[in-house]
Image (tube, rainbow, N blue to C red):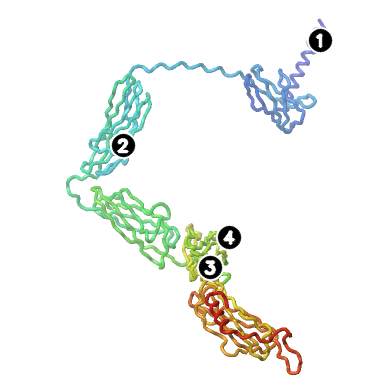
Amino acid sequence: MQKNIKWIFVAGLTLLLSLGIVAWVTAQTPITVEPTTLRTDLGGSISIYATGTLTFTEGYTVRLVNYGVLATNYINPTVLQAVVPAGLDAGDYTLWVLDTTGITVGAGSLRLVNPPAPTATPKPSSPPPPGRPILTIRNYTVEPLQVRPGQEFTVTIEVYNNGSRAGENTMAVFPGGTFIPLGDKGHLFWQVHINATFVATQRFRAPTSITNGIHNVEVQLSANDWEGNHYDYPATIPVEVIGASTGAAPTGKPKVLIESVSTTPAVVTPGTPFSLTLVLANRGSRTAVNIMTGADPASAVPASGGNVVSTDLLRIDESVTVTLPLLLKPVKEGGRQGLTIALEYSDYSGGSYSDQQTVGIDIDTSLANRPQLLINAYRTDPTSISPGDSFTLTLELANVGGGNAQRVTLALGGEDGEQLGAFVPIGGSNVSFVPDVAAGQTTVLTMRLMVAGNAETRAHNLPVALAYDTGTGTREKGTQRISLMVFRRPKFQASFYRPVEGTAMVGQPMPLPIEVVNAGTARFNVTKLEAVGEGWEFVGENSTYVGNLDPGGSWTLDATAIPLTPGPLDVVVNVYYVDDLNQTQAYSQTLTVEAMEMPQPGDGESPFPPEEQPEAPPETLMQKILRFIKGFLGLGS
C-alpha cells in the first residue's frame, strides 16, 4: 500500500513538473504559426516564425504534441516549414520547436477541423404554374425631352414580363399615328422568360403641322405562350411638343449682342493659346434658342475642341457667358486688332438668325518672348557641283527671337521630302534634329547629298521646312528656301599633237602644235583657245576662236614661241567657255617643254645625238587635210 502511494506521488509530481515546463516554455518563447487552421482530410504545410530573440538553425524540428515530430525544413534563422499529414483527428494541437538536442525552444498552437458536409443535390424545379405572359413598359426615355415640329427624336422602352409564363415570338411594334416612324417599325425578341426584360428603340419625326402640347406614341406589345395562345398589350408613351405655330403671326424677334469681352492673358501673342470670354445678352423681344458662337477661322483656330460653343436658351434681357479656347494665327501688325465673331440662333417659331460682330483684342507681335529661326547662311563642299556629284551641305540656323526653340526639326524638300527634286540624301534621311537652340545662338547642321545624274544644270530652288516648340505649348512651322547651283563641269584634255621634245632651243622660235579635245559628255561654246606661259615669247597669234565643241570633238592651235631660258618651261593652255548661266569661265591645263641652250660656234659639239635630226620633216598638204578630217569627226588630230 505504501509503495502504491509512493508511486502515485512520484507520477503526479512528474506530471506537474511536465505541465509546468510546458507552461513555462509556452509563456516565455511563443512562436507564430501560419496557417492556424487545417482540414483533417487534406493536411498541409505550415510555416513557423520565431519571435523576440528566438532564432532557428539547421537541425531544428517541429513536434505536434500527441502525434510526433513532423517533416521539417529549415528556411532561415526566423522561419521553419513543417508538413502536417492528413487523417488526424480534429481538435486543438500544441506545436513545439525542438533544437538539435531535443530541447523545446518555442511553442505554438494549431487547429485541425473536419471537412464541411457535402452540399445536398438540388431537387428539379417544378414547371411554372398555368398562366400567361404579361408585358408592361417599365421604363422609357425620349431624346430630346422636348420635340419641335419637323424634328427627329428617339423613343427607347424597357419591357418587362411579369406574367407566369415565358413570352414566345415577343414583338414590339410602333405603328405610327401622330408621329412618323423612321426605319423598321417592328422589333422581334423571340422568347422572353418570366421576370426578363428587353429594350426596343425607335426613331420618329414630328410632323411640321403638329401643335404644342403632349402627344402619345403608340406601342403594340404582343407575345404567345408555349400553347400557342396570342396576347396583345397596347401602350402609349407621352411626348411633349413645343415651338409649334399658334396660327397667329409672331411679333418681334430675338437679338443677341456681345456686351463684354476679355482675354486670358490680357495681351495675346500669335501662336500662343488664349481664352476669349464673351458676355452675350438678348436685347430683342423674343427668346433666343440654340445659340451658336464661333470665332473667324481666318484669324484664330481652336486651341482645343471645336471653334463653336452652344447655348441652349437666352431669354429676353438675360445674359450668358461663353468661353472660346483659341490659338491666334500669325499676324503682321500688333496692337488693338479686331476679331470677327459669328452668331447664329433661332426662336421658338422656327425662325433663324445669323450675325457677325467684331471684338477688339490686344496683340503683341514682338519677338521678345518667342523664338524665331532663320537660315542665316549655307554653303556646299565642293563649291561647284555637277550632275552625279556627292557634296556636303552646311546650314547655319540662327535663333533671332527672344525665347528658346525646342525640339527643332529641319527637313529638306519639305516635311515629307517630296520636293527634294534632283538631290538625294546620303547616309541619313532628309530630316535633322536639334534638341534646343537658345535665343541669340546659332547652330550648324551638315547633310550629305548627291546630285542625280540627269539633273538639269541650273539654279535649283530647295524648300527647307522648319518646326520647333515655342515653350508655351505650341509648335511653330514654316518653310524657307535655299538655291543650289548645278553646273555642267567641262572635261577638256590639252596635248601636243606632234612631238616637240628636243626641238626647243633658247632664242630660237619653235612650233607649239596644241590640240584640245572635249572628253566630256556635253557640248560647250568655246570662245577662245589660248597658249601663254612664263619664259616664252610668242610670235604671231597665240589664240584662236573655236565655237561649239561637241563631245569627243577637238580643236588645234598652232602657235610659235621662243624659249627665253633653258630648262623645263610650262605652256599654259587656257580654254574659255560659256557655262549654263551664260557666264564666261576658264579651264586651264599645263604642258611642259624642255628648252636647251643654243650651242656656241666653235664648240664642235652638236646639241642633238648623231642619230637624231634637229628638225621634224615638214607636213605635207595631204597630211594636213587628213588631220583636219580626223578632228572634225572627233577622232583627234
Tell which circle, 4 or 1, labels the residue nearer the N-terminal end: 1
The residue tagged 2 is 202
Instruction: Tell me how far mark 2 sits from mark 4, CA to CA.
Output: 63 Å
The structure residue drawn at horizontal position 69% and vertical position 24%, both measured from the top left corner, is 83
The structure residue drawn at horizontal position 48% and vertical position 75%, both measured from the top left corner, is 581
Instruction: Tell me how far mark 4 sits from mark 3, CA to CA.
Output: 19 Å
Give how far across and how far down residue 330 sits, in percent.
Answer: 42, 63
The residue tagged 1 is 6
The residue tagged 4 is 427
Kind of residue sitting beneath label 2: Gln
Instruction: Tell me how far mark 2 sits from mark 3, CA to CA.
Output: 70 Å
SS label for mark 3 = loop
Tell which circle, 3 or 1, labels the residue nearer the N-terminal end: 1
Instruction: Tell me how far mark 3 sits from mark 1, CA to CA.
Output: 126 Å
Is there a contact, CB below 8 Å, between mark 3 and mark 1?
Answer: no
Is 347 situated above or below 437?
Answer: above
Q: Nearer the viewer, residue 619 or 385?
A: 619
Give how far across and how far down residue 198 sits, in percent.
Answer: 36, 30
Is there a contact, CB below 8 Å, between mark 2 and mark 1?
Answer: no
**Which residue is outermost to the right?**
3
**Which residue is outermost to the left?**
248
SS label for mark 4 = loop
Kind of residue sitting beneath label 4: Gly
Q: Nearer the viewer, residue 114 or 460?
A: 460
Q: Nearer the viewer, mark 4 or mark 1?
A: 4
Is 556 situated above or below 539?
Answer: above
Looking at the rendered structure, which numbered label has been put on residue 387? 3
Is there a contact, CB below 8 Å, between mark 2 and mark 4?
Answer: no
Tell which circle, 2 or 4, labels the residue nearer the N-terminal end: 2
Kind of residue sitting beneath label 1: Lys
Q: Nearer the viewer, mark 3 or mark 1?
A: 3
Q: Nearer the viewer, mark 2 or mark 4?
A: 4
